[in-house]
Image (cartoon, grey):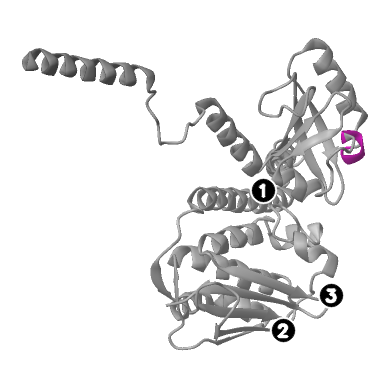
Amino acid sequence: MDFIIYFLLIIIIVLFYLLIKKNIKPINTAPTINKTNKDDLGKRVIIEELEDQFFALDKYNLIKYLNKSAKQRFGENLIDKNISSVIRDTKLLETIDEAIKDQVTKYVNVEINLPSYQLYKIYIIPGPTHLFPETDSVVLFLKDFTEITKAQKLKTDFVANVSHELRTPLVSIKGSLETILGPASDDKVAQKKFMKIMSDQVFRMENLINDLLILSRIELEEHIKPNKIVNLNDIFTNIKSNFELILKKKKINLHIELMEPTLVFGDYDKLLTVFSNLIDNAIKYSNDGKNIYVKSQNSEGKLIEKNMLINIKDEGIGIPQDLIPRITERFFRVDTEKSKKVGGTGLGLAIMKHIIAQHRGDYEILSKINDGTEIKIYLPTK
């Protein structure tokens, strides 16, 4: 009897346990995460940190959201302002209407001139999005094409300039040849004159092609920082020897006062090109009997690294103040006729700029008309 009671008691306990287990739902102590919400949050964070500008508009074209980049470019307090008050462009508003009407993504190119010129390609994406539930009309994505456009213009201008620079001597050579083969076929004096013209033009073309090849190679290697130790004393000893004849001919005194040794990190051949171009310019654009001074000293603060200042000062014809920012542009000449007369290609200072950039250095150009030019070169030092 006792056994039966004991057995029934066990059955009751088991049934009671099973009943409780069935009705108790497991408790998940970990927080519930909605994967969709998490993904949306991530996307909004990405949009917020984009370098490009982003706007979300409602159906009245009022701004309901703008990312950090848009705030930096157009201003902070733009919520609930009409996009037309921020970007004043009729074509943009027309394209927004078209995108909403057709329910397709469209884009429009817009120029904005304040506070500085910028060219944007604005992508217009219609329709509500769960990322921005407060809007029910359209989002704008602004892609800045300013630098790309400038680069394309530089490329176009470069090709046009090269074509012009090569065509000019070719026309001269062609004309001289036609004269020699035609009217001057029996005139030895005229032939000699035109042969000299052709020789000068061939020399000019050769210099131009050499400078173009140097510039092209430097631009390809500009990301590679030179790390060899170069003694600038050796470079200027070489330069003084190379220019000895022209210095004597023009009675120009080249004064070189460098620290011994003047050591920098760099590429010997490229630095030789830089300083040869600078001394060459100083000689070409100085009258007879003038002086050119080259000095070096340790410098602090101009570069992140310790650096050496190399100062080259001449007593030449000088450069107008308003043209100084442009003289490192390719083919830019202060005096076109003077430059061609002395054999300049218009690429020397552009080459200098790229070589100094490759060395992670810097430069300054100071000049006044009829008061000479001073060029300061800063290079990382040992």
**Residue 52 forms part of the magenta stretch:** no
Q: Quadrant of the N terminus?
A: top left
Residue 242 appears in the picture as rendered: no
* Disc marking residue 369: 3
Residue 6 is situated, as x and y percent measured from the top left of the image, at 12, 18
Residue at 80% across, 80% down? 371
Of the residues tagged 1 and 2, which is closer to the observer?
A: 2
Q: Classify 10 Å Cα crowding around label 1: few (below 14), some (14-19), many (20 and above).
A: many
Which callout, 1 or 3, points at the residue further toward the start of the chain? Answer: 1
Marks 3 and 2 in Cβ contact (< 8 Å): no
Q: How many marks?
A: 3
Q: Secondary structure at mark 1?
A: helix
The residues colored magenta run 83-87
Residue 321 is situated, as x and y percent measured from the top left of the image, at 83, 69
Q: Secondary structure at mark 2?
A: loop
- Say which amino acid is labelled 1: Met
Q: Which residue is mark 1?
A: 198
- Say which amino acid is labelled 2: Lys
Q: Which residue is mark 2?
A: 290
Marks 1 and 2 in Cβ contact (< 8 Å): no
- Spatial CA span between label 1 and label 3: 34 Å
Image vertical order of residue 102 relative to residue 136, above or below: above
Q: Classify 10 Å Cα crowding around label 3: few (below 14), some (14-19), many (20 and above).
A: few
Image vertical order of residue 176 relative to residue 43, above or below: below
